[in-house]
Image: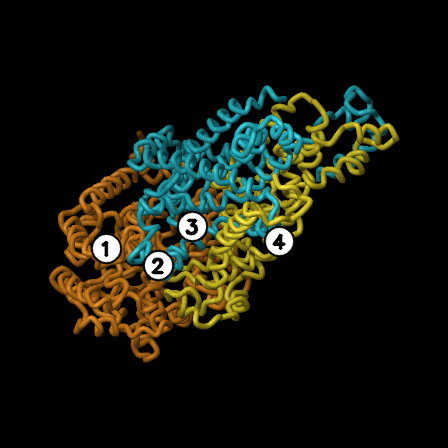
Amino acid sequence: MSATVSKTTDRGSGGRPPRRRSGRGILARLGPLPWIAPAVLLIAVVVLWPIYELIRTSFLKISTAGFVRGSAGTDKYKQLFEETDFAQVITWTVIWTVVVVGVTMLLSLGLAQLFNQNFPGRTVTRWALIAPWAASVLMTAIGFKWMLDRTAGVLNTLMMDLGIIDQSKDWLGQPGTAWPWMMFVAVFVSLPFTTYTLLAGLQTIPHDVYEAAKIDGAVGFKTYLHITLPLLRPAFLVGFVINLINVFNSFPIIWGMTKGGPDSDTATTTVYMFQLKSTDIGESAAMSVVNFAMVVVLVLIFLKVSRWNKED
Amino acid sequence: MESRTKRTFKPRTLVITAVAWGLAVIFLLPYIEMIITALRPANELRDRTYLPDDFAWSNLIDVWGESTLGTNLKITLLVAGGSTLLVLLVSLPAAYYTARMTYRGRKLFLLLVLVTQMFQPTALLVGLYREFYQFDMLNSVWTLILTNGAFNLAFAIWILTAYIGSIPKELEEAAMVDGTGRLGAMFRVTLPLAMPGVVTAVIFTFISAWNEFVMGLTLSTEPEKQPLTVGISNFIGNYTVEWNYLFAGSVIAIVPVVILFAFIERHVVSGLTAGSVK
Amino acid sequence: MNRRLIATSAVGVAMALGLTACGGESGGGDGGGDSKTVKLVAADYGDKKSNASKIYWEDVAKRFEAANKGYQVDVEVINWNDIDNKVKAMIQSGNVPDVLQTGGYADKVADDLLYKRSDVLSPATEKKLIPSFAKAGESDGTAYGIPFVSSTRLLFYNKEIFKKAGVAEAPKTWDEVKEAAQKIKDKKAADTPYGLPLGPEEAQGESMIWELGNNGGYTDESGKYTINSKANVETFSWLKDNLVKPGLTQPNPASTDRKTMFEDFAAGKLGMLNGHPTLIQMAKDGKVDYGVAPIPGKTGPLESTLGVADWMMAFKDGKAKKAAVKKFLDFAYAKENMLKFDEMYHLMPVTQEVADTMASDPKFKTLKPFTDVAGGAKFYPLGDTTWDAVSSEIKKSGGKAVVDPKQTLDDLQKKAEAAAEDQ
């Protein structure tokens, strides 16, 4: 669609020098429109419209059967904030995001450093690192649920054989053990992308920087701290932001492993939103909107921290 | 840093090699267990053993007959391929123009892209369903192509803008002085140079569309219209979970992606490099 | 604010129509549509391609179309896991089917979405329904739900495990359950002595079975919710202190789904649990030597066990003619069709003629203990329009009652009362 638009307008632009937008060419006169309009349109239809629908739904009174009974005003928000689980869900969402993103970034720094070295089988081992990325997150989560199964899970068997536990445990059955395992899986699936982003960042650091450092007498960890890390900042930031968003919105891991249960004891906001869907769509939409607001706050913080505005 | 000239097995290299290989195995283990489970006969599923007594290779064949997996696979191919193409068609011009020009609303556009990046379909499901119902577009491959495309667009634009921005303008300007139009210059000069960035965008979109679950589940209600991930999860039944078929399907689903990855692993790093220099 | 006002159906319908109209096109007010095409949405009872319900329904549709020239049936079959959410979304967007076959009906009655049963079923067909099930299809005295299939619950036990543990016969009282489970545990005869699936999948069923054992239940005679009644709190306290804490059940009942317990039982790793007819086939496939017995109560076996029915219902706002819907339903409830469906999925009949056929056919022998107790079975408060909402809450948090009985049941009662007030 977009291709045909730009192709037909192309002829008019002839051999005009670029950048001068006062030219006579149709393409030039239309400015950015033919170039970015398709993207804006797609975003508007598939991303912005549902946001509007969502906000509208959160102010509606909808019966269990899904029938719209009229306006609910702000009742659904009040109801949501009064839920006994609400505070706990928000708290866990924050803990979940901070822990998973933090651990992922730390481990990825190490992994990137490791896989940036020259050693036999580097390609093959890097390739193995990709597995959790190539597999669907839901499947990985269900795989771990299966491995942690109380009756037949291979991880239970292994831990029993190694003498770590004396009888097989129902790891995902209670929040105390379910959270650490789910966080483990979340880190596990986030590592490949983050490591690759940091690997890419490491390769942008020119070799002579290290040479210079060597001359100055910097060695080992000191080099890493004072040279590598600061230069890695842009790549780190990219990895950080993408992880932050993915982990905050993370749904398949928790849904695949505990469905947020028992009750809502292992739910984050997105999972809680899904749980509410079966009792009250309006309240669920209100939860989505709150979730949305939290994302907006994250975006604002990111803009501030990265000084995104100034850069352009 | 290690010099590239000679492979000397110093103790340090030995340790690094051992650790790296150890980690590689750890990363693969869960998937190996899935493969083992996929090959378990139904009556050995709940045995506490590392390996089954018999390997039921027939599971890998039976799974096709026991489900709509074949159709689901076709739909996933169409959706992943279609949305990747859509993302390329839409993001390339936008990224190119944004990287090369300063225009009014450029900042706003970049902000819009950033905000889109921050959203995931999970949070918007109710809205998405209602919208596509109104368009009468449920149970359609086109809907899944559109939605998967839209939610992956931001990342593609981001990476491509950064990558194209890193290609010197002068090359293009030289071509344009030679009488090639802007589009010609874009296709003949910039695009080939931007290939690693394009490859990265392609791989990201493809994988994320290939593995997408929540939208497929919501926007397609009929088993024959659902993508592979949803089809596989239908093995989680009302009374039992057919773990062996579930994982047989999952393993089959991973294969194409792993092959794709194996081919272009190198490009992914260089593509991401540009994205992270920005 | 003006909840009462909305509750009065006239205003409710008027408002509703206005609102659904903007969500999508809606059919006529109360006369149904004018199409000869009936749209059927049904749950999938199958677990593989070869026994998908779609095959069944498409076959019924084909024969119906052949027998009634000019009429057509559109079949859409949805996975059990998703059907509730999908149907909700359909209703929300005004895209209702003509006929729906799923787990519950009363929540749709609350919004006046359904035809009365007598509107869409000929008297001859309606008369075929087994009275106890027919009765369960009534909401506030008017019949809307048409029972489609049913099942009852009995105690399943593994004979081999019982023998190994030295348990002579199936327990009849709670104390005997405890005693048998303790023996199984002491002799290490099974991984799990007693299976108690109170996870989100079936918490409402398992809870009710136990509550019935102490003459409790979800509602009183007048239909008011009594979730936190003294009897119910006592039931869960007993469970907590006598089965869960001593480790006679699996570790975390509140997060255990029924299917995990069924799988364990079929693999011979579980001593006993409450199950329904589907478990017969599973146990047979797993070569488990099982027995069934009445469900133990506090002082003796239950006289009336839990009965569960799935429902058929017809939407007023569908696009098909009322007469077309009626024609189709009468066809679908013909003896051969019903029998075929029940046989396909090991479920129990809802019409007398099918029940009679099954009783006389040795092929259905294993099902007999279950059909025998169907007559006196007790149901969920199915006709209560708030039941679906309350049931969702019980599924979500009800399992916690074996951790903190009073608190959990009090919370649920509060939610149930709020839901009732909201109607």
Nearer to me, A143 or A199:
A199
The reply to whether dot 4 and dot 3 touch (C-beta < 8 Å) is no
Q: Amino acid at mark 1?
A: Met
Q: Amino acid at mark 2?
A: Asp
User: Which one is earlier in the sequence, the residue at label 1 or at label 2?
Assistant: 1
In the figure, the yellow chain has which letter? Answer: B
Residue, disc 2: C310
Image quarter in which the C terminus of chain C is found: top left
Q: On the image, which quarter does residue A152 sit in?
A: bottom left
Q: Is residue A136 visible?
A: no
Element assignment for label 4? helix
- Tell me residue C305's x, y (percent): 22, 62
Q: Amino acid at mark 3?
A: Gly
Element assignment for label 1? helix
Farthest residue, direction left? C299
The reply to whether dot 2 and dot 4 touch (C-beta < 8 Å) is no
In the figure, the orange chain has which letter? Answer: C
